[in-house]
């Protein structure tokens, strides 16, 4: 069920496009209205989600044991793992966001000869990192469809990505890489029994969704062919609010676009918001300066305190009778 | 609902929204269309149908290249029964006489930069 339902729902989504575009001719709905809905839901959803996170106070710094914190001058601080200043925190955030530092610590528990052993396991880190970077490169390459004139930076990425200069249209390395990475991430959930056990429909759905987006894009470029010029006209119309739906764009493009729109709508409400969440992880973005700075808990109740001098002045006579030395006299 | 660190959060969100919507900001006002293509005056039809050519010309060229270089086969018979010499410069650019005003216009718009011209000539 956890696998079947997400799979079927993607299947239904694709059928919906085929019926809507191919049979019912709803080009305006799928080409104009749904993309606008998707981007609005995506943006508003993300803002609300981040606002919701920001409404939880994080009064204390959470030092992690990953590195030596700042202490005595002759003990070397691990500045990136346990930062105490803003630039060091930015360094740790950059490592986390660009290189998935935490995932690099991933370990795997194994029973070998009935002994439990933990070993380093970098495959998830490698697959995850490669997946995210190739997806970023592919999305940046898509900006050739969104911008006119196309900036030179995109030409540079295209020519690096098409480095092998084989097949026409030129084969992109990232297209093969993303297929490998998504397959790996999916097979990991399907084949490793422990991971399969903890995987939910909400884990499979985004994987299937991204997989179908990638497949439809690759089909469009290398197999079925679509008219890129007309697609750019459609998108240019969307971006400048002058709607036009050119005739003769293949249905596969609408499948691709619709699945991307579904992704945009699904994004803020799913685990995929980790895109924003990684910036707000308290164990990563707060300097470990607990010893240098006093952090006061905002919801501490006001406690009525009574000092020792007050106590003494109340019980002075009794204390003198009992020959208890007074603090007052000492100071004199 | 109290928002903590609202300065930093707001700044981050504004940056995020600006990043996502920036294709809108640069496009509003003018929908830059593809420039007109200069069509051949003498001929009236391409090697294959116009629809096919628009999306598949690069695959056709690939087939031509492979069959010339690997099989020494220079003659292409189109689906309408006409025959053409399989040549980038001698056939395509014979009708589409200006590469700049035909191929390039589309390609600049779609950000395609075929590497063919580092070897092949633009005109005879
Ligand atoms: C509004 C958003 C998007 C639009 C309008 C769009 C449109 C297109 C078009 C027109 C192509 C065909 C390019 C060609 O024939 O040369 C394509 C290819 C592709 N798309 Fe998208 N796409 C979008 C978002 C995405 C996203 C979010 C992904 C996620 C990974 C993606 C992955 C791909 C892939 C892997 C290809 C294969 C060819 C290539 O790498 O350029 N697309 N897309």
Image: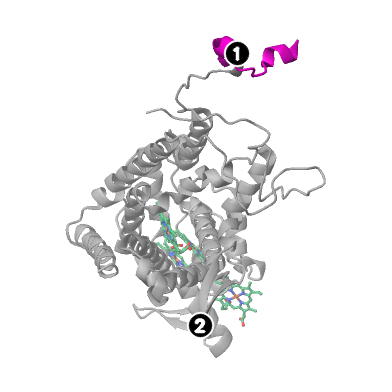
* Secondary structure of the residue carrying numbered label 1: helix
- Label 2 marks a residue whose chain is A
* Residue closest to the eye, A287 or A242: A287
Whether residue A27 sits left or right of residue A66 in the image: it is left
- Label 1 marks a residue whose chain is A
Judge: label 1 CB < 8 Å from ligand 1.
no
- Mark earlier in primary sequence (1, 2): 2
- Which quarter of the figure has residue A189? bottom left
* Secondary structure of the residue carrying numbered label 2: loop
Q: Residue at x 61, y 66 (%)?
A: B115
User: Dividing the image into 4 quarters, which one contains the C terminus of chain A?
Assistant: top right
Q: Residue at x 67, y 18 (%)?
A: A325
- Which quarter of the figure has residue A156? bottom right
Whether residue A58 sits left or right of residue B121 in the image: it is left
Quick check: is A321 in the magenta stretch? yes
Q: Position of residue A120 (x, y in %)?
A: 59, 70
Q: Is residue A211 visible?
A: yes
Q: Is residue A310 above or below residue B94?
A: above
Q: Which residues are magenta?
A: A310-332
* Residue closest to the eye, A14 or A131: A131
* Main SS category, magenta section: helix
Q: Is residue B53 visible?
A: no
Image mark for residue A114:
2
* Residue closest to the eye, A128 or A136: A128
* Residue closest to the eye, A84 or B17: A84
Q: Position of residue A15 (x, y in %)?
A: 22, 64
Crowdedness near tag 2: few (<14), some (14–19) or many (≥20) residues, C-alpha within 10 Å: few
Location of mark 1 (residue): A321
């Amino acid at each position: 069920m956890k696998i079947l339902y997400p799979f079927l729902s993607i299947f239904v989504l694709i059928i919906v496009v085929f019926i809507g575009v191919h049979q019912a001719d709803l080009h305006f709905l799928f080409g104009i209205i749904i993309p606008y809905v998707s981007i609005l839901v995506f943006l508003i959803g993300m803002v609300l989600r981040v606002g919701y996170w920001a409404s939880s106070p994080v009064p204390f710094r959470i030092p992690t044991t990953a590195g030596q914190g700042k202490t005595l001058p002759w003990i070397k601080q691990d500045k990136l793992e346990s930062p105490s200043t803003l630039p060091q925190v930015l360094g740790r955030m950059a490592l986390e966001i660009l290189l998935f530092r935490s995932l690099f610590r991933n370990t795997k528990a194994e029973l070998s000869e009935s002994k439990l052993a933990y070993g380093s396991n970098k495959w998830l880190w490698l697959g995850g990192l490669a997946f995210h970077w190739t997806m970023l490169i592919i999305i940046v390459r898509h900006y050739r469809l969104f911008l006119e004139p196309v900036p030179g930076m995109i030409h540079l990425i295209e020519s690096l990505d098409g480095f092998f200069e084989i097949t026409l249209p030129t084969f992109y390395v990232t297209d093969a890489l993303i297929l490998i990475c998504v397959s790996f991430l999916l097979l990991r959930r399907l084949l490793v029994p422990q991971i399969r056990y903890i995987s939910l429909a909400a884990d499979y759905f985004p994987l299937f969704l991204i997989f179908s987006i990638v497949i439809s894009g690759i089909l469009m470029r290398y197999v079925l062919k679509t008219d890129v010029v007309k697609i750019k006209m459609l998108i240019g119309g969307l971006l400048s609010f002058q709607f036009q739906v050119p005739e003769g764009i293949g249905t596969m493009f609408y499948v691709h676009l619709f699945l991307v729109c579904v992704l945009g709508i699904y994004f803020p409400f799913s685990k995929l918001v980790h895109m924003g969440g990684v910036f707000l992880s308290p164990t990563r973005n707060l300097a470990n300066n607990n010893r240098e700075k006093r952090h006061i808990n905002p919801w501490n109740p006001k406690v009525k305190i009574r000092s020792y001098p007050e106590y003494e002045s109340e019980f002075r006579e009794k204390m003198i009778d009992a020959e208890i030395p007074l603090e007052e006299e000492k100071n004199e | 609902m109290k928002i903590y660190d609202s300065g930093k959060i707001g700044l981050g969100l504004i940056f995020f929204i600006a990043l996502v919507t920036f294709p809108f900001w640069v496009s509003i006002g003018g929908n830059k269309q593809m420039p007109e293509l200069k069509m051949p005056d003498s001929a009236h039809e391409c090697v294959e149908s116009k629809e096919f050519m628009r999306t598949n010309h690069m695959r056709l060229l690939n087939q031509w290249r492979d069959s010339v270089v690997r099989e020494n086969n220079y003659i292409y018979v189109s689906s309408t029964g006409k025959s053409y010499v399989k040549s980038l410069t001698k056939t395509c650019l014979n009708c589409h006489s200006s590469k700049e005003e035909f191929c390039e216009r589309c390609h600049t718009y779609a950000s395609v930069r075929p590497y063919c011209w580092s070897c092949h000539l633009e005109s005879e």
